[in-house]
Amino acid sequence: MFEIYLPLTLVAVFLNPLTTLVTQASSVETHVNNVVSHLVGVMDTTTQAAKNPNKPSVRMTTCRVQVMEKPNAVYLYQEQALTSKLDRPYRQRLLLIQSAQTANTVESRSFKPTDAPSLIGLCDHAETRRQIPLQQLGESVCSVFLKPTERGYTGETPPKGCPANLNGAVTITNTIILHEEGMDTWDRGFDERGNQVWGAENEGYQYRWLKIN
């Protein structure tokens, strides 16, 4: 019987690509999980609004959901409402959190639900009850691409922004910073001439963690 011995250098050639792929997959999964863990929960801008009367007091609630036809994908449901009108959110989105084509980058792709009123308060239910049919995804609104930083993650929309039709804006842009205190966002809307018509100016919207009993 013949025994075959592979030189160590040849073994390394075979193993290194596999090791690299496993490491990359682990790294990508870690970044996706980190972003999800940071977004899930309740944050509000109450502290900022108390200091600056020009800033609204807003609560953002985010939770994991399952899109029934896509069991392996990571989806979040997110709603924003004035703290004085929590039962009437002014913004509702479904977020697909996934790895982007660029290395060490996580894409948060937002969808506008087709039947948003039926989802109000969804995060109050147990996760096993947060099942959403595929047709609820509606149209893809925009994507934010997040990269790791020393404090957490920083993300932006594509350079030219995303098309919109909202309060006089035909294009929207956003910059998001996830950090140890919560999240800062710079939502901005621009008209056809490129003039900003609404959104953050001198400072972003400062969402801070809120403990809910």
Image: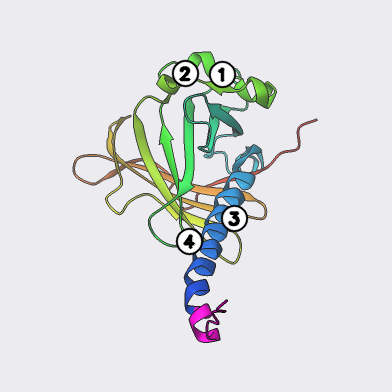
Residue 40 position within the rendered picture, expressed as x and y whole percent measured from the top left: 63, 39
Nearer the viewer's eye, disc 4 or disc 2? 4
Q: Which mark is residue 104?
A: 4
Q: CA distance from mark 4 to mark 2?
A: 32 Å
| 3 magenta-colored | yes
Q: CA distance from mark 1 to mark 4?
A: 33 Å
Residue 94 position within the rendered picture, expressed as x and y whole percent measured from the top left: 48, 31
Nearer the viewer's eye, disc 2 or disc 3? 3
Give the residue drawn at x 48%, y 61%: 104
For label 3, the residue is: 30
- In the image, residue 59 sits, relative to residue 107, either above or below, namely above
Highlighted magenta segment, given as a residue range: 1-12
> Element at badge 1?
loop
Q: Residues within 10 Å of mark 2 (few under 14, many from 20)?
A: some
Residue 4 position within the rendered picture, expressed as x and y whole percent measured from the top left: 54, 79
Nearer the viewer's eye, disc 1 or disc 3? 3
Tags 2 and 1 touching, CB below 8 Å: yes
Q: Residues within 10 Å of mark 3 (few under 14, many from 20)?
A: few
Q: CA distance from mark 2 to mark 1?
A: 7 Å
Q: Which mark is residue 120?
A: 1
Residue 148 left/right relative to 173? right
Amino acid tagged 2: Ala
For label 2, the residue is: 116
Tags 1 and 4 touching, CB below 8 Å: no
